[in-house]
């Protein structure tokens, strides 16, 4: 009797691990399922993080453009609430515009403030004639009070100080193209794509040395089938891009008796001069090869890629773009090619 009871207790104890194992299995299955779901979610999050806007809202609204034969509505900033003290206006200031209910102005209406700087021409482009009117985008206003022929507006965004005489236009709708986060280095010697080519003809704020996130203007537009969101490679020919220009001609002699001592006679050869043109003819004094001669007779060199850009807005003959990647400083005059 005692033996049977003891055996029953042992059987119960032996069954406990199996019961415990089967009880845990559903939890493990749920954990594994949850891990798979979490992995998929993390993968989606990483993928979404790799797609970032190429330009911030400020860069989109303050970029400027070169527009061919622009039309204006005649509305302009003509005064300010505090004009007894100042004639320049920024964020939050109240200004007056020369249009009211007679011109169809309504409370809450928004305008873009622009400043045309005149016709833009440059020797950097192959296009004939002028490219357009360079126009700065200096801010935005919202109408708060409408009178008969005048309205009161508040500056809601200021790219630069607003001046009397600045013109008003409708607010353009712009969406930033995506800029993928690159995980590989820029291919600095990539082959040409064979697509549209142009040049950087101007940079915002008259910059000549350009880097990432700077705004530039190129001589490609809708007439060249360019569109917002297009990505371009920025490049220049090898050997160009220096600030100063000089004739790169060697002046060190190939050999000279002054290069050795009278005591030890270490040799007449210069350790800085280039080689003689024909080693089997002539002597140690030359003639030597020179850098200009080598450059004239060498085969075509690969172009040097210095950066990438993406187009923000397009006009008839030009486009506004933002620099997204750089290998070194970019200059006005550098070439661009659609990728």
Image (cartoon, helix red, strand yellow):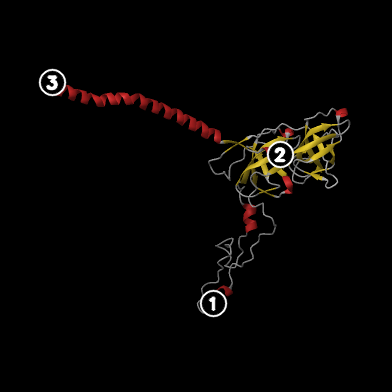
Q: Say whether disc 2 or disc 3 marks the residue closer to the N-terminus.
A: 3
221 sits left or right of 296 in the view: right
Query: Label 3 crowding class (10 Å Cα cut-off): few <14, some 14-19, many 20+?
Result: few
Query: Label 2 crowding class (10 Å Cα cut-off): few <14, some 14-19, many 20+?
Result: many
In front here: 8 or 226? Answer: 8
Residue 68 visible to the viewer: no
Q: CA distance from mark 2 to mark 1?
A: 64 Å
As helix, strand or loop, the secondary structure at mark 3 comes to: helix
Residue 177 visible to the viewer: yes
In front here: 202 or 187? Answer: 202
The residue at which mark 3 appears reads as 4
Q: Quadrant of residue 102?
A: top right
- Residue 78 lies, in percent from the top left, at 86, 40
Closest to the camera, between mark 3 and mark 1, is 3
- Residue 199 lies, in percent from the top left, at 70, 43
Where does the N terminus fall, quadrant-wise? top left
The residue at which mark 2 appears reads as 320
């Amino acid at each position: 009797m005692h033996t049977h009871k003891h055996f029953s207790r042992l059987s119960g104890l032996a069954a406990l691990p199996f019961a415990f194992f089967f009880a845990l299995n559903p939890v493990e299955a749920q954990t594994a399922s949850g891990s798979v779901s979490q992995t998929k979610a993390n993968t989606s999050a990483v993928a979404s993080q790799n797609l970032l806007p190429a330009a911030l809202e400020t860069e989109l609204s303050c970029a400027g453009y070169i527009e061919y034969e622009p039309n204006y509505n005649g509305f302009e900033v003509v005064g300010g609430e505090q004009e007894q003290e100042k004639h320049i206006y920024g964020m939050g200031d109240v200004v007056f515009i020369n249009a009211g209910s007679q011109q169809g102005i309504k409370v809450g209406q928004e305008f873009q403030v622009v400043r045309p700087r005149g016709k833009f021409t440059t020797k950097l482009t192959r296009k004939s004639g002028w490219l357009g009117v360079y126009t700065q985008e200096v801010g935005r206003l919202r109408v708060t009070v409408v009178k008969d022929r005048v309205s009161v507006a508040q500056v809601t965004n200021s790219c630069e100080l607003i001046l009397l005489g600045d013109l008003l236009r409708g607010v353009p709708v712009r969406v930033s193209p995506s800029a993928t986060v690159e995980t590989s280095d820029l291919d600095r010697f990539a082959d040409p794509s064979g697509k549209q080519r142009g040049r950087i003809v101007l940079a915002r704020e008259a910059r000549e040395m350009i880097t990432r996130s700077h705004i530039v203007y190129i001589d490609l537009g809708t007439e060249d089938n360019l569109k917002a969101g297009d990505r371009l490679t920025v490049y220049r020919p090898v050997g160009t891009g220096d600030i100063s220009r000089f004739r790169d001609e060697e002046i060190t002699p190939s050999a000279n008796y002054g290069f050795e001592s009278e005591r030890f006679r270490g040799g007449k050869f210069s350790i800085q001069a280039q080689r003689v043109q024909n080693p089997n003819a002539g002597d140690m004094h030359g003639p030597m090869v020179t850098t200009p001669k080598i450059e004239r007779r060498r085969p075509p060199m690969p172009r040097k890629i210095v950066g990438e850009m993406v187009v923000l807005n397009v006009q008839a003959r030009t486009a506004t773009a933002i620099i997204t990647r750089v290998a070194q400083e970019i200059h006005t005059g550098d070439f661009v090619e659609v990728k």
